[in-house]
Amino acid sequence: METKLTDPDLWERIRAGDELAFEELIRRFYRPLYHYGSKFTRDVDVLKDGIQDLFVELWAYRRNIAQTEYVRVYLFKSLRRKLYKESIRRGYTESMEDDFLEGSFFEESFEDELIRTELSAYQRSRLENLLKTLTDRQQEAVHLKFFAALPNDKIAEVMGLNYQSVANLLHRAVNKLRDGWHTLLL
């Protein structure tokens, strides 16, 4: 592409059938989708298939998809729904929260994100330990807010919650992190 298009402009070009725009969308979002999806399944093949299916369906139905200002939200929400449906197809009977949010939310990509922010090893260790004290839902909300840079209303869409629930989750998580950080300093 000649200049870097905004996500909504890229989306509009895809809707019009621009194959180069579609290739750029894949380059731009494959890795974030992989990192996000890895929170819901440890099966790499299921995750890769889910992402591939998402892109294939997006291209196949490009003329029917709505324009959006929030391409990342659309893709995250679609992948989350796709992985959830796959868990049902495989016979999991537990709720989505139990299936998808079991265990630590930040197992693999958490450290990568912290390294990018260039925190010292000591600070990274402290923050990592504090994040482990959060509930899985709080961890997911924190990831979407601070690492994916989504606004609360879009986090609500991705997580399938209402706006106030997201605000409450983030408020409790930030307070817990702040209190834990200050406690460690004493």
Image: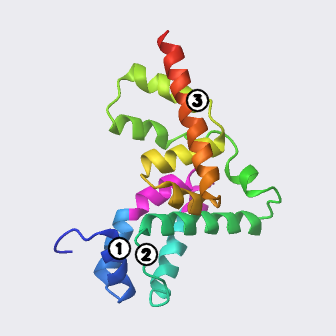
Would residue 166 be found to the left or right of residue 60 on screen? Answer: right
61 magenta-colored = no
Is label 2 in a helix, a strand or a loop?
Answer: loop
Q: What amino acid is at disc 3?
A: Lys
Residue at image coords 49%, 84%: 65
Disc number placed over residue 176 in the picture, else none:
3
Q: What amino acid is at disc 1?
A: Pro
Is label 3 in a helix, a strand or a loop?
Answer: helix
Which of disc 2 and disc 1 is earlier in sequence?
1
* Percent position of residue 176, x then y: 58, 29
Of badges 3 and 1, the one in the foreground is 3
Q: Nearer the viewer, residue 19 or 97?
A: 97
Which of disc 3 and disc 2 is earlier in sequence?
2
Q: Answer whether residue 182 is visible to the viewer in this image.
A: yes
- Find residue 94 and report its image quarter: bottom right
Which of disc 1 and disc 3 is earlier in sequence?
1
How many marks the image carries: the answer is 3
Q: Which residue is mark 2?
A: 68
Q: Is residue 124 above or below residue 183?
A: below
Majority SS type along the magenta span: helix
Q: Which residue is mark 1?
A: 8
Proximity of marks 1 and 2: CB atoms separated by less than 8 Å: yes
Q: Is residue 184 above or below residue 86?
A: above
Q: Is residue 52 above or below residue 159?
A: below
Proximity of marks 2 and 3: CB atoms separated by less than 8 Å: no
Q: What amino acid is at disc 2?
A: Thr
- Give the magenta range: 29-47
